[in-house]
Image (spheres, helix red, strand yellow):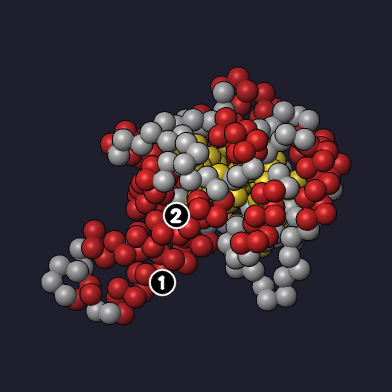
Amino acid sequence: MLVSAKEMLTKAKAGKYAVGQFNINNLEWTKAILQTAEELKSPVILGVSEGAGKYMCGYTTVVGMVKGMINELGITVPVALHLDHGSYEGAKACIEAGFSSVMFDGSHYPIEENIEKTKELVAVCNEKGLSIEAEVGAIGGEEDGVIGGGEVADPNECKMIADLGVTMLAAGIGNIHGKYPENWAGLSFDTLAEIQKLTGTMPLVLHGGTGIPDDMIKKAISLGVSKINVNTECQLAFAAATRKYIEAGKDLQGKGFDPRKLLADGTAAIKATVKEKMELFGSVGKA
Ligand SMILES: [Zn+2]
Protein backbone atom coordinates (compact mmCIF):
# COMPACT_ATOMS: atom_id res chain seq x y z
CA MET A 1 0.00 0.00 0.00
CA LEU A 2 1.14 3.53 -0.72
CA VAL A 3 1.08 5.29 2.65
CA SER A 4 2.51 8.32 4.43
CA ALA A 5 5.80 7.60 6.19
CA LYS A 6 4.46 8.84 9.53
CA GLU A 7 3.24 5.59 11.05
CA MET A 8 6.17 3.43 9.93
CA LEU A 9 8.66 5.96 11.30
CA THR A 10 6.84 6.46 14.60
CA LYS A 11 6.96 2.68 15.07
CA ALA A 12 10.63 2.57 14.06
CA LYS A 13 11.58 5.28 16.52
CA ALA A 14 9.73 3.51 19.34
CA GLY A 15 11.17 0.13 18.34
CA LYS A 16 14.77 1.40 17.95
CA TYR A 17 15.24 0.43 14.31
CA ALA A 18 15.33 2.42 11.07
CA VAL A 19 13.40 2.28 7.81
CA GLY A 20 15.51 2.53 4.67
CA GLN A 21 14.85 5.10 1.99
CA PHE A 22 16.11 3.65 -1.26
CA ASN A 23 16.21 6.01 -4.21
CA ILE A 24 14.74 4.80 -7.48
CA ASN A 25 15.98 5.53 -10.99
CA ASN A 26 13.87 3.37 -13.26
CA LEU A 27 11.57 0.35 -13.45
CA GLU A 28 14.22 -2.24 -12.50
CA TRP A 29 15.23 -0.24 -9.43
CA THR A 30 11.66 0.17 -8.23
CA LYS A 31 10.79 -3.48 -8.79
CA ALA A 32 13.95 -4.73 -7.04
CA ILE A 33 13.31 -2.58 -3.94
CA LEU A 34 9.59 -3.39 -3.69
CA GLN A 35 10.17 -7.14 -4.11
CA THR A 36 12.90 -7.18 -1.47
CA ALA A 37 10.75 -5.23 1.00
CA GLU A 38 7.89 -7.69 0.47
CA GLU A 39 10.14 -10.76 0.79
CA LEU A 40 11.60 -9.45 4.04
CA LYS A 41 8.30 -8.03 5.35
CA SER A 42 9.92 -4.64 5.82
CA PRO A 43 8.35 -1.20 5.48
CA VAL A 44 10.12 0.83 2.80
CA ILE A 45 10.46 4.36 1.49
CA LEU A 46 11.08 4.93 -2.22
CA GLY A 47 13.08 8.12 -2.68
CA VAL A 48 12.84 10.22 -5.84
CA SER A 49 15.15 13.18 -6.38
CA GLU A 50 13.97 15.97 -8.67
CA GLY A 51 16.54 14.88 -11.24
CA ALA A 52 15.42 11.24 -11.13
CA GLY A 53 11.80 12.39 -11.37
CA LYS A 54 12.62 14.29 -14.52
CA TYR A 55 14.55 11.30 -15.90
CA MET A 56 11.56 9.01 -15.30
CA CYS A 57 9.34 11.40 -17.32
CA GLY A 58 7.81 13.37 -14.48
CA TYR A 59 6.15 12.78 -11.12
CA THR A 60 2.84 11.50 -12.46
CA THR A 61 4.71 8.80 -14.40
CA VAL A 62 6.49 7.79 -11.19
CA VAL A 63 3.23 7.65 -9.23
CA GLY A 64 1.62 5.56 -11.98
CA MET A 65 4.55 3.12 -12.08
CA VAL A 66 4.77 2.69 -8.32
CA LYS A 67 1.02 2.28 -7.82
CA GLY A 68 0.87 -0.17 -10.72
CA MET A 69 3.71 -2.26 -9.31
CA ILE A 70 2.25 -2.34 -5.79
CA ASN A 71 -0.90 -3.72 -7.35
CA GLU A 72 0.62 -6.12 -9.90
CA LEU A 73 3.30 -7.50 -7.56
CA GLY A 74 0.83 -7.87 -4.67
CA ILE A 75 2.90 -5.72 -2.32
CA THR A 76 1.35 -5.72 1.16
CA VAL A 77 4.08 -3.96 3.17
CA PRO A 78 3.74 -0.20 3.77
CA VAL A 79 5.41 1.78 0.97
CA ALA A 80 5.96 5.54 1.06
CA LEU A 81 6.75 7.40 -2.16
CA HIS A 82 8.91 10.31 -1.08
CA LEU A 83 10.42 13.33 -2.82
CA ASP A 84 14.10 13.54 -1.86
CA HIS A 85 15.68 17.00 -1.36
CA GLY A 86 12.71 18.77 -2.84
CA SER A 87 12.60 22.45 -3.69
CA TYR A 88 9.54 24.41 -2.61
CA GLU A 89 8.10 24.14 -6.14
CA GLY A 90 9.08 20.46 -6.46
CA ALA A 91 7.34 19.60 -3.19
CA LYS A 92 4.14 21.25 -4.38
CA ALA A 93 4.32 19.39 -7.71
CA CYS A 94 4.78 16.01 -5.99
CA ILE A 95 1.90 16.63 -3.60
CA GLU A 96 -0.22 17.41 -6.65
CA ALA A 97 0.99 14.29 -8.52
CA GLY A 98 0.08 11.88 -5.70
CA PHE A 99 3.30 11.28 -3.73
CA SER A 100 2.61 10.14 -0.16
CA SER A 101 5.56 12.00 1.35
CA VAL A 102 7.86 14.92 0.52
CA MET A 103 11.09 16.39 1.73
CA PHE A 104 11.46 20.13 1.62
CA ASP A 105 15.14 20.96 1.70
CA GLY A 106 15.22 24.57 2.81
CA SER A 107 18.65 24.17 4.41
CA HIS A 108 20.20 26.65 1.97
CA TYR A 109 17.75 29.40 2.96
CA PRO A 110 18.33 31.62 5.99
CA ILE A 111 16.61 29.91 8.95
CA GLU A 112 13.69 32.41 8.95
CA GLU A 113 12.86 31.66 5.32
CA ASN A 114 13.33 27.91 5.85
CA ILE A 115 10.79 28.14 8.71
CA GLU A 116 8.28 30.17 6.71
CA LYS A 117 8.30 27.85 3.68
CA THR A 118 8.36 24.69 5.81
CA LYS A 119 5.34 25.95 7.77
CA GLU A 120 3.33 26.46 4.61
CA LEU A 121 4.14 22.99 3.25
CA VAL A 122 3.42 21.35 6.63
CA ALA A 123 -0.09 22.81 6.52
CA VAL A 124 -0.70 21.41 3.01
CA CYS A 125 0.70 17.96 3.94
CA ASN A 126 -1.30 17.77 7.17
CA GLU A 127 -4.48 18.53 5.29
CA LYS A 128 -3.78 15.73 2.80
CA GLY A 129 -2.41 13.20 5.31
CA LEU A 130 1.09 13.20 3.81
CA SER A 131 4.39 13.06 5.67
CA ILE A 132 6.98 15.81 5.35
CA GLU A 133 10.70 15.87 6.04
CA ALA A 134 12.65 19.06 6.68
CA GLU A 135 16.38 19.64 6.75
CA VAL A 136 18.61 21.74 8.96
CA GLY A 137 22.32 22.10 8.25
CA ALA A 138 23.26 21.12 4.69
CA ILE A 139 24.36 17.52 4.11
CA GLY A 140 27.82 17.41 2.54
CA GLY A 141 28.63 16.28 -0.99
CA GLU A 142 26.55 16.59 -4.12
CA GLU A 143 22.97 15.52 -4.71
CA ASP A 144 21.69 16.28 -8.19
CA GLY A 145 23.78 19.40 -8.49
CA VAL A 146 22.92 20.62 -4.99
CA ILE A 147 26.27 20.97 -3.24
CA GLY A 148 26.30 20.88 0.54
CA GLY A 149 29.28 21.74 2.71
CA GLY A 150 28.93 18.92 5.25
CA GLU A 151 27.72 21.15 8.04
CA VAL A 152 26.86 20.13 11.54
CA ALA A 153 23.36 21.37 12.37
CA ASP A 154 22.60 23.73 15.23
CA PRO A 155 20.43 21.67 17.65
CA ASN A 156 18.38 24.74 18.57
CA GLU A 157 17.53 25.35 14.92
CA CYS A 158 16.54 21.66 14.69
CA LYS A 159 14.16 22.19 17.60
CA MET A 160 12.65 25.26 15.88
CA ILE A 161 11.97 23.31 12.68
CA ALA A 162 10.74 20.19 14.53
CA ASP A 163 8.20 22.34 16.40
CA LEU A 164 6.61 23.36 13.08
CA GLY A 165 4.97 19.93 12.93
CA VAL A 166 7.15 18.17 10.37
CA THR A 167 7.00 14.36 10.39
CA MET A 168 10.75 13.74 10.33
CA LEU A 169 13.88 15.82 10.49
CA ALA A 170 17.15 15.51 8.58
CA ALA A 171 20.03 17.13 10.41
CA GLY A 172 23.57 17.42 9.14
CA ILE A 173 25.90 15.64 11.57
CA GLY A 174 28.97 15.43 9.37
CA ASN A 175 27.38 12.98 6.92
CA ILE A 176 28.05 13.32 3.19
CA HIS A 177 26.27 12.22 -0.01
CA GLY A 178 28.14 9.82 -2.25
CA LYS A 179 31.42 8.14 -1.43
CA TYR A 180 33.16 9.25 1.78
CA PRO A 181 36.69 10.68 1.52
CA GLU A 182 39.61 8.88 3.19
CA ASN A 183 40.02 11.64 5.75
CA TRP A 184 36.34 11.80 6.76
CA ALA A 185 35.94 12.87 10.41
CA GLY A 186 32.99 10.55 11.09
CA LEU A 187 29.54 11.34 12.47
CA SER A 188 29.14 13.85 15.27
CA PHE A 189 27.31 11.74 17.84
CA ASP A 190 27.40 14.52 20.43
CA THR A 191 25.38 16.72 18.07
CA LEU A 192 22.98 13.86 17.33
CA ALA A 193 22.44 13.20 21.04
CA GLU A 194 21.80 16.91 21.62
CA ILE A 195 19.30 17.08 18.74
CA GLN A 196 17.54 13.95 19.99
CA LYS A 197 17.30 15.43 23.51
CA LEU A 198 15.66 18.61 22.19
CA THR A 199 13.34 17.03 19.62
CA GLY A 200 12.08 14.06 21.69
CA THR A 201 10.01 11.58 19.69
CA MET A 202 10.67 13.21 16.30
CA PRO A 203 12.09 10.56 13.90
CA LEU A 204 15.54 11.73 12.76
CA VAL A 205 16.86 11.08 9.26
CA LEU A 206 20.39 10.16 8.28
CA HIS A 207 21.28 11.06 4.69
CA GLY A 208 24.32 9.75 2.83
CA GLY A 209 24.08 6.18 4.15
CA THR A 210 26.61 4.82 1.65
CA GLY A 211 29.96 4.05 3.25
CA ILE A 212 29.11 4.88 6.87
CA PRO A 213 30.56 1.96 8.89
CA ASP A 214 27.97 -0.46 10.31
CA ASP A 215 28.80 0.29 13.94
CA MET A 216 28.24 4.03 13.34
CA ILE A 217 24.87 3.24 11.70
CA LYS A 218 23.84 1.20 14.72
CA LYS A 219 24.93 3.90 17.14
CA ALA A 220 23.02 6.53 15.13
CA ILE A 221 19.88 4.35 15.33
CA SER A 222 20.32 4.04 19.10
CA LEU A 223 20.44 7.86 19.26
CA GLY A 224 17.12 8.38 17.49
CA VAL A 225 17.78 7.97 13.76
CA SER A 226 14.78 6.11 12.32
CA LYS A 227 15.15 6.76 8.57
CA ILE A 228 18.35 6.17 6.63
CA ASN A 229 18.79 7.18 3.00
CA VAL A 230 20.63 4.85 0.63
CA ASN A 231 21.29 5.79 -2.97
CA THR A 232 24.90 5.56 -4.16
CA GLU A 233 25.41 2.05 -2.78
CA CYS A 234 22.68 0.59 -5.01
CA GLN A 235 24.13 2.45 -8.00
CA LEU A 236 27.61 1.07 -7.38
CA ALA A 237 26.26 -2.49 -6.96
CA PHE A 238 24.18 -2.24 -10.15
CA ALA A 239 27.10 -0.84 -12.17
CA ALA A 240 29.59 -3.45 -10.93
CA ALA A 241 27.28 -6.40 -11.72
CA THR A 242 26.40 -5.00 -15.16
CA ARG A 243 30.09 -4.40 -15.92
CA LYS A 244 30.89 -7.98 -14.95
CA TYR A 245 28.13 -9.33 -17.24
CA ILE A 246 29.44 -7.38 -20.22
CA GLU A 247 33.13 -7.99 -19.52
CA ALA A 248 32.36 -11.72 -19.40
CA GLY A 249 30.94 -11.31 -22.92
CA LYS A 250 27.53 -12.61 -21.84
CA ASP A 251 25.73 -10.02 -23.94
CA LEU A 252 27.34 -11.63 -27.00
CA GLN A 253 26.12 -15.12 -26.19
CA GLY A 254 22.72 -16.24 -27.52
CA LYS A 255 20.08 -13.66 -26.61
CA GLY A 256 22.26 -12.11 -23.91
CA PHE A 257 21.66 -8.70 -25.46
CA ASP A 258 17.98 -8.83 -24.45
CA PRO A 259 17.58 -6.03 -21.87
CA ARG A 260 15.68 -8.41 -19.61
CA LYS A 261 18.88 -10.50 -19.49
CA LEU A 262 21.37 -7.65 -19.76
CA LEU A 263 19.95 -5.88 -16.71
CA ALA A 264 19.15 -8.99 -14.64
CA ASP A 265 22.45 -9.28 -12.77
CA GLY A 266 22.48 -5.57 -11.93
CA THR A 267 18.91 -5.81 -10.68
CA ALA A 268 19.82 -8.81 -8.51
CA ALA A 269 22.71 -6.78 -7.10
CA ILE A 270 20.31 -3.99 -6.08
CA LYS A 271 18.15 -6.58 -4.32
CA ALA A 272 21.15 -7.94 -2.43
CA THR A 273 22.19 -4.44 -1.34
CA VAL A 274 18.68 -3.55 -0.17
CA LYS A 275 18.47 -6.82 1.79
CA GLU A 276 21.81 -6.17 3.47
CA LYS A 277 20.69 -2.67 4.49
CA MET A 278 17.28 -3.76 5.78
CA GLU A 279 19.02 -6.36 7.95
CA LEU A 280 21.50 -3.77 9.25
CA PHE A 281 18.76 -1.21 9.94
CA GLY A 282 16.63 -3.80 11.79
CA SER A 283 13.47 -3.28 9.69
CA VAL A 284 13.11 -6.93 8.61
CA GLY A 285 9.81 -8.42 9.80
CA LYS A 286 8.52 -5.05 11.03
CA ALA A 287 5.82 -4.57 8.36
ZN1 LIG B 1 20.18 13.53 1.10
In the picture, measured across the screen, residue 225 lies left or right of residue 65, that is right
Image check: 262 left or right of 145?
Answer: left
- Whether residue 134 is visible to the viewer of this picture, yes or no, is no
User: Label 1 to label 2, Cα distance in Å?
Assistant: 17 Å
Q: Is residue 2 visible?
A: yes
* Residue located 69% across and 52% down the image: 220
Task: Tell me where residue 250 appears, x and y as whole percent.
Answer: 23, 75
Circle 2 residue: 275
Depth check: 171 or 8 in front?
A: 8
Position above or below: 34 against 254: above
Residue at 82 percent across and 41 percent down: it is 197
Task: State which tag comes first along the sequence, 1 or 2.
Answer: 1
Kindly identify the amino acid type of the residue bearing the numbered disc 1: Ala
- Residue mark closest to the camera, 1 vs 2: 2
- Say few, some or many: other residues with alpha carbon within 10 Å of mark 1 (under 14 / 14 to 19 / 20 or more): some
What residue is shown with label 1?
240
Q: Quadrant of residue 158?
A: top right
Element carrying mark 2:
helix
Looking at the picture, how far across and down is residue 224, in whole percent? 71, 44
Hey, what amino acid is under mark 2?
Answer: Lys
